[in-house]
Amino acid sequence: MLGAAPRPAAAEDWPTRPVTLMVTFGPGGMMDYVSRSLASVLTTALGQPVIVEIKPGGGGVVGIVSAAKAAPDGYTLVVSAVGPLVFRPIMDKSVGYDVDKDLAPVILVGDTPNVLLAAPKLGVNTLKELVAYADKNQHRLSIAHPGPGTMGHLCGVEFAKQAHIGGNFIAYRAGTPIVADLLGGQIDTGIPAYGPGWDAVKMLAVGSEERMDFLPNVPTFKESGYNIVCSTWIAIYAPAGVPRPIVLKLNAAMDAFLRDPETRAKFSKMGLNTLGGSPERLRDRVIADRAAWSPILSGMSLDSSK
């Protein structure tokens, strides 16, 4: 008589070796900082090292494709954002992944507003002055963003449209190198998701509905006369097929951390509104944002195959 079939080792004994947490944008920004904080929490909770691997490129696409192809054993996770998870698949039919079929939602980490930054060399202090500067320079500005199809990219396109200026859009792999090039005078403006320590550049507008407590002197786009709200949420996924017990174990450890009052206060001062919740909360957020943005993005296209 055959004995009962053993339970999958991945669900019963996991983890027995280090876990990789892929970060789909470059180092130094909010996503990098939050990912390292969560890796530390998971290392303690799981009893195995959780190693952060920076894997930027293609506005977040490279890291997601890599994670989607990984074995569904719980040893590969990916941290990404609304752009590559919602916007890019709408705009780019050759993106190389289907979020619903290729990935398993783990947790919605939090969101942070995008900020319009200006290079000190411009000598501007408001959006009105920035537009006047553009008018004097043949109505053109270089506008940096964290990659094609990201919230920063779309926010920049909308600002240029409403301000009636031409934008020379430049894709970067993260917000930190945008700030470095602003300080160096290589570019005029940038619209990354907010990151800590960016006080050296001029912040002209924040993409939140209301002014942020951590940026009390920075007006919203709406205050400055532009109907623009842009905020970037961050989330963690696993490859599709990861056993449900593993997903729930990961979710429980991170959710407890994100809901802790001290954690919330700490991240709030840095510009991140922590969210947390069940995997289903993340799934529903993606579905809702996809429905809301599809009509807006239907006329825009990108092509990862080129």
Image: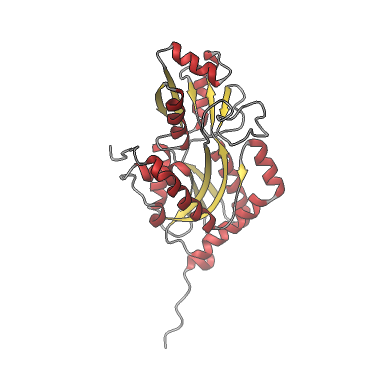
Picture residue at 47% right of the left edge, 28% below the top: 159
Name above or below for residue 286 compared with residue 195.
below
Image x and y of residue 285, in percent = 50, 51
Residue 92 pos. (x, y %) = 33, 42
* 195 displayed left or right of 303: right
* Horizontal relation, residue 292 to residue 248: left or right: left
Q: Position of residue 83 (x, y in %)?
A: 45, 41
Q: Quadrant of the N terminus?
A: bottom left
Image coordinates for residue 153, horizontal then vertical, percent: 44, 33
Q: In this rendered view, identify the residue nearer to me: 5 or 211.
A: 211
Identity of the residue furthest to the left in this view: 306
Q: Kindly tell me whether residue 15 is visible in this rendering.
A: no
Q: Residue furthest right?
A: 262
Q: Quadrant of residue 57?
A: top left
Quarter of the C terminus within the rendering: top left
User: Who is closer to the viewer here, 45 or 149?
Assistant: 149
Q: How many marks?
A: 0
Q: Residue at x 44, y 14 (%)?
A: 135
Front residue of 70 and 213: 213
- Residue at position x 62%, y 43% from top? 273
Name which residue lies at 63% across and 50% down: 258
